[in-house]
Image (cartoon, rainbow, N blue to C red):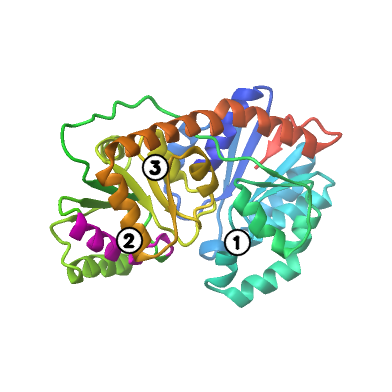
Amino acid sequence: MRSTLANCRALHAAAPETRTTLVAARRGLTAAWESRLRDHLPSGMDLELFPAVGTGAFSFSRRLLRWVRDSAEGFDLVVVRTMFNPVTTGAAWAARKARVPYVVVPHGTLSRYTFGHRRTVLKKVFFSMFGASMLRNASAIRYTTEAEMKEAERLGSFSPAVVLPHPFESRERNRPRARREPSRVLFLSRLHPKKGLDTLLPAFAELRRAVPRARLTVAGSGPKPYEERIASRIGELGLESAVTLAGFVGGERKDRLLEGSDVFVLPSRHENFGIAVVEAMDAGLPVVITRRVDIWRDVERAGAGLVVDRAVRPLAEALRTLLLDPARALKMGQAGQQVVRERYAPGRIGSELAAFYRDAAGARSASRTLA
């Protein structure tokens, strides 16, 4: 939802004549969160929420699909965000039935990782029966990184595709440069096995042998059993005094963590974009990521960090390099800030998004979009 709102804000700023209706299932959304969500809607954007049954990606909302079916003709373009979901698949079908062009934003769901983890057979069957047709009949497909598009190409040739990153609203930050040796490593993400903590923790233990002053903050939350596994692993490695489990962080607390850290690390098995990496670059942090974080090419081209294999030794070596070479780390942090301000700038992305939607809508004006 966060990326959806960021894209809508960028679009509406670039094309204020646009009217967008965001349609979603109200699963797990409290009244307080709904109120907060409505407060963050940009001008010219409406919100329609519907009850759903089921959990996770395979939840279903009959009322939502009925609304899309009955309302699609009133829009110039339908934007379908993600796949392997009866709701989004049904929305694409409803748009096609109403002869309204639609765009698909896969959000990493066409990756090898997605097809190789959890419900693999079901995903392959679902894609064969519905997903491939959904892509073939789309007016266009929007990927957020080159890596995401290249991975999807193995599944076949589908609709015209474009690579258009998520917009990021950069902030002016006052990141203090304390008179101390760099020591603080930050991991910021939800806690999930795919995020690579099983590699990071032993890599950090190895790093500590070379840089005893190093400290790691693990910021994020996840399922309780997994959080307990991480805490247990920290104990096994004898890192209790060097690793802080900060839990979920947001707002000013997150800002303080970013501004007080020296290096950011995210050794994921798969990230279709990696918004936390962009946040870290915006804060002036050099980043250490794997080639499974799909913005790695942007990071490598700009010299904004180190891109490594997801293994203990290269990860430990990259962290050691940046902690022991503060001049290089500072230069990388500055390069990262420049990437964020130029490549992910909402003004640029909004203008490109408006042009993309106009092309996808064809004869229609794309002044009314359904997301």
Tag nearer the camera, 2 or 1: 2
Residue 19 in the image: above or below residue 305:
above
Residue 309 screen position, x and y as percent: 44, 61
**Label 3, label 1: how many angstroms apart (C-alpha)?**
34 Å
The residue located at (39%, 31%) in the rendering is 334
> Disc 1 marks which amino acid?
Ser
Q: Secondary structure at mark 1?
A: loop
Question: Which amino acid type corresponds to the residue marked 2 in the rendered image?
Answer: Leu
- For mark 2, give the secondary structure: helix
**Most common SS among magenta residues:** helix
Q: Which quadrant of the view contains residue 352?
A: top right
Q: Is residue 157 visible?
A: yes
Q: Nearer the viewer, residue 214 or 352?
A: 214
In x, y percent, where is residue 182? 22, 41
Q: Which residue is mark 2?
A: 200
Residue that label 3 marks: 32
Magenta part of the protein: which range? 194-210
On the rendered structure, is 209 left or right of 144? left
